[in-house]
Image (spheres, rainbow, N blue to C red):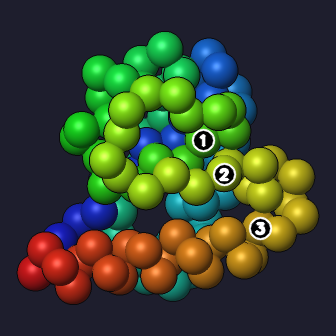
Amino acid sequence: MYKVKILVVCGSGVATSMHAAFKLREYLDRHRINAVIDGAGNNELEGRAANYDIIISNTMVTANVTAPVFSAIPLLTGIGEEELVEKVIAEIRRIQAEKN
């Protein structure tokens, strides 16, 4: 099974992206979905985006990326969190079906 790679992005790549990545990891573990989740600062996005299947960001993504981009805000506020996770899981399954 293809292991989807997710990059969680915030302004500096420290606290906010790590918090969102931790919350996402909890959800994916509950659904038994094995994925690579990394954090990064917005200034790193353009150089790293090509190595990831999904981008989740709490900032405006202005870099030219081909991966689907989701807002990290629900993971930080809790508002719309489950809906976001459902969308991310659907995208993970779509990518896995394509890559396998």
Quadrant of the drawing holding the C terminus: bottom left
- Percent across and percent down for residue 72 are 68, 49
Location of the N terminus by quadrant is bottom left
Per the image, label 1 sits on a secondary structure element best described as strand
Tell me the kind of residue under disc 1.
Ser
Disc on res. 99? none
Distance from Cα at disc 3 to Cα at disc 1? 14 Å
- Secondary structure state at the residue bearing disc 2: strand
- Tag count in the figure? 3
Q: Residues within 10 Å of mark 3 (few under 14, many from 20)?
A: some
- Between residues 32 and 88, which one lies in front from this camera angle? 88
Residue receiving disc 1:
57
Label 3 amino acid? Glu
* Residue located beneath label 3 in the image: 81
Residue that numbered label 2 is attached to? 71
Image position, residue 5 (x, y; %): 31, 54
